[in-house]
Amino acid sequence: MSMQRRTFLRLSTVAAATVGGATLVGTGLSGAATPARTLGTAPTKPFAVGVRQYGWTRGNRRINTYVYYPATGNPGGNPVTNAPVAEGVFPVYNFTHGFGSSPQNSLFIIRALASAGFVVPAPHFNHSFADVNNGNTSKDVSQALTNTLALNTSGPLAGHINTSVGVGVSGHSLGGMVTHGLLTRWPDSRVISANPQSCVDMGNPAGSVSAKVLFVHGDRDSTTSYSSARQAYTEMRWPKAFLTFLGGSHTSFWSDQRFPKTVVDWARWTMYGDTAARDRLPADAAGPRTRWEAQLG
């Protein structure tokens, strides 16, 4: 399908959705060689969550990133700044927030991933629609992934990051577009799992990326086109899945526990090889006003 047929998001600040006073439309390089796939063992119990902040850059572009991770202590509650890392070796699963938002506004999904056994770099962007559509933000996320993996060599996270399995990427709205961009126009071949949320189609799937992809979208989204996300899903190679919140808006599913449960199931299956999590997907996505579709192979 030619690029001329594609519809990219052209939003003004006024058009961006808002929740609790915060605008929320979240965004997405590197051609690293495909890494060896060495899966760890999926954790059986949830973790407390810690967070550390890093002031990274890519050229003259700042990539201020909060890195959330499994921590020692009792599960539940808010992330603890600079908490000691839990015992174990954990894969990396990025989250990119929406327009005018922040990682802190998306803690409900970031915390779910970190508690389940993932290191979650979450850059805080002052999103530019131009930078999303020209690939700069996707390249920034790839740089944040590179820097997160490098934390395995020194500092408090050393020895606790699985650098051989590949990486996961997720994000909402502009962040979902950034995520899809890493699978298409600005591919990062390290990506083996992806979760674009409320995204639009950013391009043809890249042959250099082999990822299992879960789309999440409300079919009454007036901010990002549901039909465009459906086009992206149709073009994506399997394994893939699509969770539709029937009657759902741009952010209404954020308060539905089926959303984080399904995303965590997907991450555990694709990053840890947790087949029990894969088998839970239809049930965890089921209920009033959802539609689950999957081609898992």
Image (cartoon, helix red, strand yellow):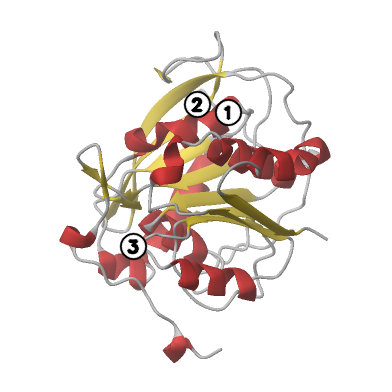
Q: Position of residue 156 (x, y in %)?
A: 51, 22
Q: Quadrant of the N terminus?
A: bottom right
Tag 2's secondary structure? loop
Q: Residue furthest left?
A: 14
Residue topped by disc 3: 222
Structural distance between the alpha carbons of marks 2 and 3: 44 Å
Residue topped by disc 1: 158
Label 1 crowd (10 A; few <14 / some 14-19 / many >=20)? some
Dot 2 and dot 1 residues touching (CB under 8 Å): yes
Q: Residue at x 24, y 36 (%)?
A: 20
Q: Quadrant of the C terminus?
A: bottom right
Residue 107 in which image quadrant: top left
Identity, as a three-letter code, of the amino acid under mark 3? Ser
Identity, as a three-letter code, of the amino acid under mark 2? Gly
Vertical arrangement, residue 211 with respect to residue 162, above or below: below
Q: Residue at x 46, y 66 (%)?
A: 226
Left or right placement of residue 295 versus residue 207 in this view: right
Q: Count all numbered tags in the image, as a single digit.
A: 3
Left or right placement of residue 78 versus residue 206 in this view: left
Residue 11 visible in the picture: yes
Residue closer to the observer: 257 or 74:
257
Label 3 crowd (10 A; few <14 / some 14-19 / many >=20)? some
Marker disc for residue 87: none
Of badges 3 and 1, nearer the viewer stands 3
Residue closer to the observer: 9 or 230:
230
Left or right placement of residue 68 versus residue 268 in this view: left
Residue topped by disc 2: 155
Sequence order check, earlier mark of 3 and 1 = 1
Sequence order check, earlier mark of 2 and 3 = 2
Q: Position of residue 14 (x, y in %)?
A: 16, 59
